[in-house]
Image (spheres, rainbow, N blue to C red):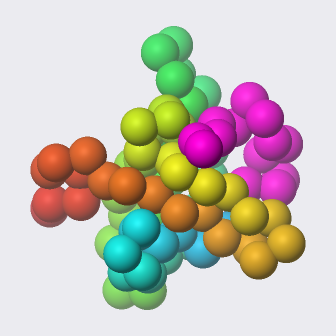
Amino acid sequence: MGAGVSEYDCDEIIGLTVETTDGRLLGRIARVMFTGANDVYSVRGENGAEFLLPAIHQVVKDIDLEAGKMVIEPLPGLLEL
């Protein structure tokens, strides 16, 4: 069950914690960028590092507004710096 920003308002997405399907905490969504192909979430980690997540069903597996989190399944190489 994936979800994208089109199903939520940006103010609902910004601030959500992001974790992987195996429970690794990655950070919080700092902003949403609107591109031609798909939206992109900017995630800021505790150490200040930023990475970009495509808002596509293959990556975003669940958005739980009540719990304040998004669960993702990173594509190969997505989280490598």
Q: Is residue 48 visible in this depiction of the protein?
A: no
From the viewer's perspective, tell me whether residue 32 is left or right of residue 43. right
Judge by depth and name the residue closer to the eye, 49 or 57. Answer: 57
Task: Magenta stretch: give its range.
Answer: 1-14
Which residue corresponds to the image point at 53% horizontal and 51% vertical from the top-left? 61
Judge by depth and name the residue closer to the eye, 47 or 64. Answer: 64
Q: Where does the C terminus fall, quadrant-wise? A: bottom left
Residue 13 located within the stretch drawn in magenta:
yes
Counting from the top left corner in percent of width and height, residue 53 is at 42, 47
Image mark count:
0
Residue that lies at the very extreme toward the front in this rendered image: 1
Compared with 75, 22 (above or below) is below
Compared with 21, 56 (above or below) is above
Counting from the top left corner in percent of width and height, residue 71 is at 53, 63
Which residue corresponds to the image point at 50% horizontal and 35% vertical from the top-left? 57
Which residue corresponds to the image point at 31% horizontal and 53% vertical from the top-left? 74
Residue 22 located within the stretch drawn in magenta:
no
Compared with 49, 13 (above or below) is above
Residue that lies at the very extreme toward the top in this rendered image: 36
From the viewer's perspective, tell me whether residue 53 is left or right of residue 66. left
From the viewer's perspective, tell me whether residue 57 is left or right of residue 62. left
Q: Is residue 5 visible in this depiction of the protein?
A: yes
Residue that lies at the very extreme toward the bottom in this rendered image: 46
Counting from the top left corner in percent of width and height, residue 60 is at 51, 48
Q: Where does the N terminus fall, quadrant-wise? A: top right
Counting from the top left corner in percent of width and height, residue 78 is at 23, 50
Residue 64: name its quadrant.
Answer: bottom right
